[in-house]
Amino acid sequence: MATRRVLVTGCSSGIGLAVAARLAKDELRRFKVVATMRDLGKRGPLEKAAGDSLNKTLEIKELDACCETSIKECINSLPNRRVDVLVNNAGVGMIGPLECQSIDAMKELFDTNFFGLVRLVKEVLPDMKQRQSGHIVVMSSVMGLQGLLFNDVYSASKFAVEGFCESLAVQAMKFNIKTTLVEPGPVVTEFERKMYESAEKMDLSGTDEETARIFRELYLPYSKEIFTSLSQTPEEVAEQTVNVITAKDPPLRHQTNKVYMPMTALKHADPTGQLPLHTFYKMIFKHDRVFSATLGVLRLLQRRAGKK
């Protein structure tokens, strides 16, 4: 089997770092990894994770997903501009009451999470079409399937990513190009830790007292509990991403955390949207009974999934 060149974005930490390192250390040496990041000054953790694969099956390059020139320069630096697999991972998060978020911050989030993907695909898609081969792998989220309280803008960006890829996948098939949306639930990374630390210090003066109370006293504590109980590691997500890349017939969507499948399935169970809406409302605002019971069921499902 020919070695495939895989370009991975957002490799300075978290999932991107884990995916790049895992692919580079593939025992069958099926991949040549181009691990990219916006700031090469943050390459230290990736170099450490890459180990002996550094400068052999893994090379590190600069790429800013928010800059078309940066993307083009990176792709042009590759032999024949060849990218067999694009793993779009670069992204940013945002949580908190909508009234406390600036429009400029929302635009910056979309510029990375959505338009960053669009810029990359625009650059590699024509070459993939010409070669009649390729695989576009996009790190999405279960929040691209189901909105979550106080994640309004982040979820909107992932919904946009899902719609973009679902539409593009039809055209891509005509050129023998695969498209896969990898959809993790909560993942424990330094990125997530810093985001929640910032949320705890967030200025909530722009919203009403009740909304601020819900955010501080309900959302933040229960989010921490969910992360503690049900989260995955970047390495677990990376392993499943590799499985998707090596699959003979990769799926359009792949949820990495099986315990979330019943929650995302609620939307399809009721086309009116009332079932998931009322379920999540009860989980949050009738939390003493419903949230604890739901979390208990999800923990049980996670243990069973781990045994398989």
Image (tube, grey):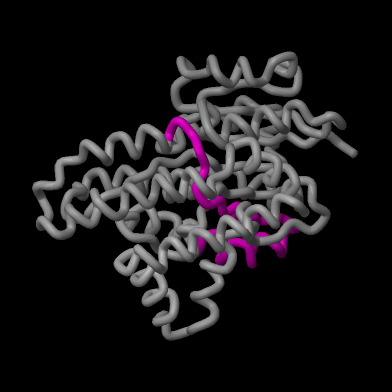
**Left or right, residue 303 beside residue 299:** right
**Quadrant holding the N terminus:** top right
Tell me if residue 72 can be seen: no
Where residue 198 appears, x then y in whole percent? 28, 35
Residue in the foreground of this view, choosing between 300 and 234: 300
Q: Report the residue that reaches farthest toward the front.
A: 289
Which residue does the image show at 49% across and 34% down from the upper left?
189
Start-end of magenta stretch: 162-191
Where residue 89 appears, x then y in whole percent? 54, 41
Which residue does the image show at 27% across and 41% down from the upper left?
199
Residue 26 sits in quarter:
top right
Q: Is residue 288 magenta?
A: no
Q: How many marks?
A: 0
Q: Report the residue that reaches farthest toward the right.
A: 1
**Quadrant holding the C terminus:** bottom right
**Left or right, residue 256 beside residue 114:** right
Which residue does the image show at 55% across and 47% down from the upper left?
139
**Left or right, residue 224 beside residue 173:** left
Q: Is residue 120 above or below residue 51?
A: below
Q: Is residue 253 above or below residue 205?
A: below
Where residue 221 appears, x then y in whole percent? 33, 48
Which residue does the image show at 34% across and 55% down from the upper left?
151
Where residue 5 appears, x then y in whole percent? 73, 34
Q: Is residue 167 magenta?
A: yes
Tell me if residue 228 can be seen: yes
